[in-house]
Image (cartoon, helix red, strand yellow):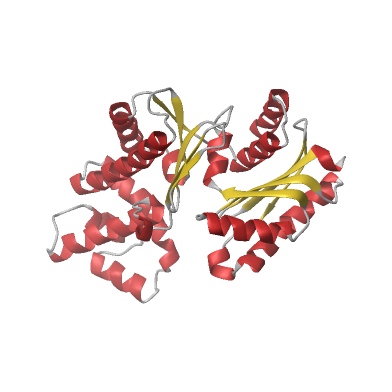
Amino acid sequence: MGLTASVLAVDAGNSKTDVAVVTADGEVLATARGGPFRPPAVGVERAVDTLAEAVAEALAAAGAGSVDHVSACLANADLPVEEEQLAAALQARAWGTRVDVRNDTFAILRAGVDEPLGVAVVCGAGVNCVGMRPDGRTARFPAIGRLSGDWGGGWGLAEEALWHAARAEDGRGGPTELARTLPAHFGLDSMYALIEALHLRHVEPARRHELTPVLFATAAAGDPLARSVVDRQADEVVAMATVALTRLDLLSEPAPVLLGGSVLAARHPQLDDRIRELLAARAPKAVPTVVTARPVLGAALLGLDRVGAGAAARQRVRERFAA
């Protein structure tokens, strides 16, 4: 394989890393999967070491020492300064002549569109939104939690549900079935018992994410407070999408709004219907679509865009990942 005829595509998330080696005509030579990519927890170099294991496996399987272009879509690359820092760390590994680093939300956006045009909102553990146009213009948010004005995502929804349930049980808040359904998920009979179990780590704090589906089930059963939390998540998703569309001058023309991440991909009827209803009112020309394609496809397509590959190459790689 010639050096100038390939892309190393990397999609690195908080739970796993996917890598693919792709030729300029869209042939996928090799893929590999690695561990989580968490620079805030372990530092940049150790996080890149995790990438290196999957990259080495994929390059070896492809019979390549390096590639022309590295297209890396990385979790926790939330600010331009972080993208620059991570790009320098990847460049130092000499996997490719050129390196582009983007936030991993761009991979979901590019995986869901035929050309780099549109907006993507990802609601997984957290929430993020990006947009792009073929001329290179982008729209994005810092997306680092409440500090940057974010609300929701799976972790945030679980925290909100716990807050309301605790206040319902002790009388500070209005009634909600969440005061029963959340502790019942862990075999407990009260919010006090659940609070104690979480505080003393009898239930590991990381298991709080299990409460997000309980919130949606309680909302689906008709609980007004749970339904209000789900509606607020829909409003946040649409607010981010509408701002990104506005920044890119896309409100007045048909434009894809891609919905990804575990919370949105689950297609909860109340959340999904409310998002579409609000988009129809605030951005009537937007075309909402749930993306279920693997994000590494988006990283590969961004790489092929960068090396000037044609439509046939992009279709070929899309078909390969669809298969």
Estimate the x, y position of residue 241 in percent, counting from the top left.
39, 38
Outermost residue, bottom direction? 200
Marker count (numbered):
0
Q: Going 34% across and 38% down the picture, which residue do you hit?
A: 238
Residues 115 and 171: in front is 115
Estimate the x, y position of residue 302 in percent, counting from the top left.
64, 38
Quarter of the image that includes the N terminus: top right
Quadrant assignment, res 46: bottom right
**305 shown above or below 60:** above
**103 shown above or below 111:** below
Quarter of the image that includes the C terminus: top right
Q: Going 27% across and 42% down the picture, which residue do you hit?
A: 231
**46 shown above or below 307:** below
Q: Going 39% across and 61% down the picture, which residue do you hit?
A: 208
Estimate the x, y position of residue 97 in percent, counting from the top left.
78, 49
Quadrant assignment, res 193: bottom left
Residues 157 and 23: in front is 23
Q: Going 82% across and 50% down the picture, which residue do you hit?
A: 66
81 left or right of 154 in image = right
Quadrant assignment, res 192: bottom left
Tell me if residue 213 can be seen.
Answer: yes
**279 shown above or below 239:** above
Estimate the x, y position of residue 220 in percent, counting from the top left.
28, 40
Residues 127 and 175: in front is 127
Tell me if residue 35 can be seen.
Answer: no
